[in-house]
Image (tube, helix red, strand yellow):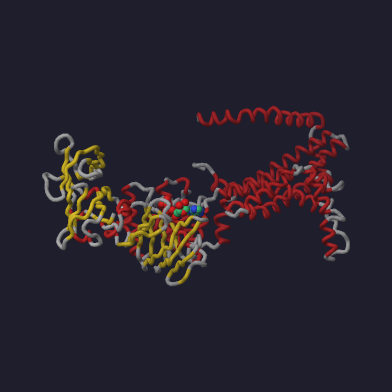
Amino acid sequence: MAVLELTNITKKFGDFTAVKNMNLTVADGEMVALLGGSGCGKTTTLRMIAGFTEPYAGEVKIDGRVMNKIPPYKRNVSIFFQNYALFPHMTVFENVAFGLKLQKLPKDEIRSRVEKILTMVKLTGLDKRYPRELSGGQQQRVALARALVTRPSILLLDEPLSNLDAKLRVEMQVEIKRIQKETGLTTIIVTHDQEEAVSLADRVIVMNEGEILQVGGPKEVFDYPATPFIADFMGFSTFLHGTVEEKGADGGRIVCSGVSLAVEPAELKTLEKGDACIAAIRAENMEVAEGFGQNVVGGHIRSLTYKGQRTRLEVEGCFAEDIYPAIHDYEKTGEDGQILIRLPKEKIRVYKA
Amino acid sequence: MNRNRSAFLLALPTLVALIVLFIVPMGYIFYETIAENGWTDFVNFFQDEFYRGILITTVRVSLITTLITFLLGYPTAYFMARTKSKLKNVLMIVILFPFLVSAVVRSYGWMVILGKQGLVNQFVQFLHISEEPLKILYTETAVIIGMVHLLLPYMILSVAGVIQNIDPNIEYSAYSLGANPAQTFWKVVLPLSTPGIFAGCTLVFIMSMTSYVTPKLLGGSKFRMMSTMVEQEVNVNFNWHRASAISYILLFAILVILFLLNSATAGMTKRVGGGKNA
Ligand SMILES: Nc1ncnc2c1ncn2[C@@H]1O[C@H](COP(=O)(O)OP(=O)(O)OP(=O)(O)O)[C@@H](O)[C@H]1O
Ligand SMILES: [Mg+2]
């Protein structure tokens, strides 16, 4: 229950700048996802918020109060560590109760709160075990319970669900989201997984090399990445180089490798006719076409990978670049691996090259 | 099972050497002592106040030495394990330095410092703390000072090794849950370093109990510990039986005290360092 503000924070390790001039405000009760590749400075950012390391420059504010010089144990910021960092000499119960004991709560209350949170993370009956007697996923949930149980004003989660199977992961996502909403916890969650980010967070922050590239609602970042780089990170599979052919109020066209594609006029806002551009589309947004029509291209399947519900294709010959559609319930069509693919007009993003 | 067996094979050469060169001769000496004099040497030892006093002195000096090396060594070890500063390497060399000098030379060094005209007394008189020179050399204090100096590195290295392996994020977790540095130390760092403390204390205690050069040179002729007494029985009194009885009593005293220390810390050591199913 707090507002978190980062103003111009920078962190250096020697000559290397891990976080550059970062500005971010997280509203009271908001859940924000930090998304970015390995080594882009996500953990470093959390460590500055928690107070384990001081920013080289800039300010960390909680509820308007500058925190730079406040030690971590006075911040009421809970952190879930990527490597769990459970207390190896304490049982599951003692691990979770640690923060509550420090708050000098009555024994009964500690017991009931620990039991409640252990039920929530589905660890009932394991409270007498030591961390080394638990599986990786169980340890992860103990760490999650330990961070949640103290009712912090800010919760920092560093990849809390990376080690769980798909089913448990979804269940935990729901639980985290529920607790977070119920208690109005201001939360930052770090993840590599774009789908987790968009399904959990109110806002998504995309980082790269210590800088924020884009901040936006989940749908916005998922469907309208600001740059081809972000699009690539958000799971766009196919990138085509081309030029703007036509720009009008009710329609636009671009040409990629001699093929003319219709695009939404809004996509061409910052571009002029004749400008070089890059078109991007998500794999699952392309579909198999029965015959030629708008934005339908023909190509030859070079390879295909079965991915459960979808089949991922590598199609060559449509453009200079290969395209990578992921087709729902794919069944073989056409002769000799020939295939027609539609790139739906409203799903194509166009960027300045 | 198979893995255990090959691990055993790896230890076999050392084991054989130890049994042939150490356990067998020791058993033989024990047998000889008992065969000729029965338990009289042992009984006499405990009946004679003089000898009992030597055992008590030895245990007292060793315990005090162990305690002081722990109190001095632990903070240093923590610093060594956690610092990122370049001072670490310098400190490492300083800590290891006593190893580079033989025990004899080191003890003579302390004689120069602690003697009647030594540095300490010059300083004391310069400050007019005491008009009489302090008698430090050839007392128990001098022996303890010398032993602490000699054994401190063992304590520091044992403890630092264990602290280095404690994930710093565990400490950070404690902080973020509201524990201040003192609480984090008592509830997290100290319990997790018990294996190192145990190893360090064991090493230092055994080495103090059996030390010879330091008590001989810094304790003077009237100060006796078990090992100097053994030497005296062999070289001065030519009483080999008593010498071997004293050696055995020393050995058992060490084993008993280590057993007590072990049971005192066993719970924690097991919780912290034990195997998967401990
Ligand atoms: N103590 C340190 N000393 C030097 N460099 C460091 C230190 N900690 C982190 N770095 C560097 O700072 C950069 C950011 O690290 P950080 O741990 O924040 O990455 P991350 O985004 O959390 O990555 P991941 O997703 O792999 O956990 C990395 O390049 C890392 O090598
Ligand atoms: Mg990280």
> Could you say which quadrant of the image residue B129 lies in?
bottom right
Residue at horizontal 41 percent and vertical 61 percent from the top: A155
Residue at horizontal 17 percent and vertical 57 percent from the top: A246
Nearest the eye: A258 or A301: A258
In the rendered view, would you say A75 is above or below B232?
Answer: below
**Picture mark count:** 0
- Position of A252 with respect to B65 (left or right) is left
The answer to whether residue B52 shows anywhere in this view is no
- Position of A99 with respect to B61 (left or right) is left
In the rendered view, would you say B243 is above or below B92?
Answer: above
The answer to whether residue B12 shows anywhere in this view is yes
Nearest the eye: A189 or A244: A244
> Could you say which quadrant of the image residue B249 lies in?
top right
Q: Position of residue B46 (x, y in %)?
A: 80, 43
Q: Position of residue B181 (x, y in %)?
A: 56, 61
Nearest the eye: B83 or B170: B83
Nearest the eye: A325 or A295: A295
- Extreme residue in the bottom direction: A64
> Could you say which quadrant of the image residue B33 lies in?
top right
In the rendered view, would you say B35 is above or below B249?
Answer: above
Q: Position of residue A320 (x, y in %)?
A: 24, 44
Q: Position of residue A317 (x, y in %)?
A: 21, 41
Residue at horizontal 69 percent and vertical 43 percent from the top: B256
